C-alpha cells in the first residue's frame, strides 16, 4: 500500500533577499514623478476652487445639438486654412465685382470670417435696397457657410417680426416646379394661389428668431433636423456653398423676380367723404420670373 503523502518543505531563500510581505500588508508603490494616482471621491486641497457640478441631461443635449442656427460652433478648423479659403473666395468675387454691382450686389462690410452684402433691385424704379445678407465662413469648408439676413446699414440681424408679410419672392415648392416644368405659368401671382399653389418664402425663422436662408450649401440647411439625410459632404467640392453660388442664389431668388411696387391704402368713409391713406409700399413679384429648378 502507498505510504502517506509527502509534505513539501519550503525552499530556502538566498541570503540578503527580503521575504515578500502579504498583499494586504504591502504599502502602495510610490507614483512616478509628475503623476498622481487617481482616487475616488478625492478631497480637493484646501483653498482650491470647487469643481463645477456635473451638467444635467437637458444641458448635455442642448450642448450636443448644433441647432438652432444662430448658435455659433467653436472654431476647430485651423484659422490659417480657413483664412486661405476665405481669401480665395473673396478674390474671385473681386474679379467680377463690376458684374455683381450691375446686378445690385455690393460688398458693404468685410471682417474675417464674415462678409456682409447689400442686395438692391436696379431694374425696379428708384433702385430699392431690398435686404442685406451676412455670410459667415467660420470652419470653412469643413462646415458650409452660414447665411443670415441682416440690415444692410446697421448689420443687425433681422427677426421674423421685423419683416412684412410678403417681403420677397419665394422659392418654388415641388408642385410649382412640376407646374412650371410642363408649361410656364402666366398671369398674376393671385392666379397661382387660386389653384392651390403656394410659394415658400426664402425667409425662414420664427418671429423671435434670426432669419436665415435655407437652401443646399448653407449651414442652416444642412444642420436643420429636416435635412439630416442631405449631408454637406454630398455637395462639398462641387461648387455648392461657394461665395459665387450663394450670391447667385440670393440674387436669382431674391431680387431678380421683383418688378413693381404694390401700394397699400387704408380707406375711411367720413360722412360723404372718402379718405384714402397710403399705409405701405411693398415690392411686387412677377411669378413667371421665379427660377425653375
Image (spheres, helix red, strand yellow):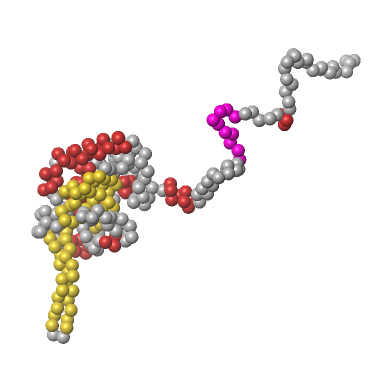
Indicate the position of residue 195 as horizontal and vertical percent values.
22, 62
Estimate the x, y position of residue 257 in percent, counting from the top left.
16, 55
Q: Is residue 223 magenta?
A: no
> Between residues 183 and 197, which one lies in front from this camera angle?
197
Q: Is residue 193 above or below residue 250?
A: below
Residue 249 in view here: no
- Residue drawn at x 37%, y 43% as measured from the top left: 74
Q: Position of residue 11 (x, y in %)?
A: 78, 15
Q: Extreme right residue here?
A: 1
What is the count of numbered marks? 0
Q: Position of residue 172 (x, y in %)?
A: 23, 54
On screen, residue 32 versus residue 119, left or right, reads right
Does 33 lie within the magenta span? Answer: yes
Vertical position of residue 232 compared to residue 250: above or below: above
Let me know if residue 6 appears in the view: yes
Residue pushed farthest front? 47
**Looking at this view, is 25 or 99 the one in front?**
25
Q: Quarter of the image containing the N terminus?
A: top right
Q: Residue at x 11, y 56 (%)?
A: 127
Q: Residue at x 37, y 39 (%)?
A: 76
108 or 225, nearer to the observer: 108
**Vertical placement of 80 versus 63: above or below?**
above
> Which residues, given as a range, are shown in magenta?
31-40
In percent of the image, x 51 and y 48: which residue is there?
52
- Main SS, magenta residues: loop
In which quarter of the view is residue 242 placed? Answer: top left
**Residue found farthest to the bottom:** 271
Nearest to the observer: residue 240 or residue 51 = 51
Q: Is residue 269 above or below residue 158?
A: below
Amino acid at each position: 500500500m502507498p505510504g502517506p503523502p509527502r509534505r513539501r518543505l519550503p525552499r530556502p531563500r538566498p541570503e540578503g533577499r527580503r521575504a515578500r510581505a502579504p498583499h494586504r500588508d504591502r504599502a502602495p508603490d510610490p507614483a512616478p514623478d509628475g503623476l498622481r494616482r487617481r482616487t475616488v471621491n478625492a478631497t480637493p486641497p484646501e483653498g482650491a476652487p470647487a469643481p463645477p457640478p456635473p451638467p444635467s441631461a437637458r444641458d448635455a443635449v442642448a450642448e450636443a445639438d448644433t441647432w438652432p442656427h444662430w448658435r455659433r460652433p467653436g472654431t476647430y478648423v485651423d484659422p490659417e486654412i480657413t483664412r486661405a479659403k476665405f481669401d480665395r473666395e473673396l478674390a474671385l468675387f473681386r474679379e467680377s465685382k463690376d458684374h455683381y454691382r450691375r446686378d445690385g450686389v455690393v460688398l458693404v462690410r468685410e471682417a474675417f470670417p464674415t462678409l456682409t452684402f447689400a442686395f438692391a433691385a436696379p431694374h425696379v424704379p428708384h433702385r430699392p435696397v431690398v435686404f442685406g445678407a451676412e455670410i459667415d465662413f467660420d470652419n470653412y469648408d469643413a462646415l458650409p457657410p452660414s447665411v443670415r439676413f441682416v440690415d444692410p446699414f446697421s448689420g443687425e440681424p433681422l427677426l421674423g417680426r421685423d419683416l412684412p408679410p410678403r417681403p420677397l419672392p419665394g422659392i418654388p415648392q415641388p408642385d410649382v416646379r412640376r407646374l412650371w416644368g410642363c408649361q410656364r405659368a402666366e398671369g398674376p401671382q393671385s392666379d397661382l394661389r387660386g389653384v392651390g399653389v403656394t410659394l415658400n418664402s426664402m425667409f425662414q425663422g420664427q418671429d423671435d428668431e434670426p432669419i436665415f436662408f435655407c437652401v443646399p450649401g448653407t449651414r442652416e440647411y444642412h444642420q436643420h433636423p429636416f435635412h439630416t439625410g442631405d449631408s454637406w459632404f454630398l455637395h462639398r467640392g462641387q461648387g455648392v456653398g461657394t461665395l459665387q453660388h450663394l450670391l447667385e442664389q440670393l440674387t436669382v431668388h431674391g431680387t431678380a423676380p421683383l418688378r413693381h411696387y404694390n401700394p397699400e391704402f387704408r380707406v375711411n368713409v367720413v360722412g360723404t367723404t372718402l379718405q384714402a391713406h397710403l399705409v405701405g409700399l411693398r415690392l411686387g413679384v412677377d411669378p413667371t420670373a421665379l427660377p425653375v429648378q
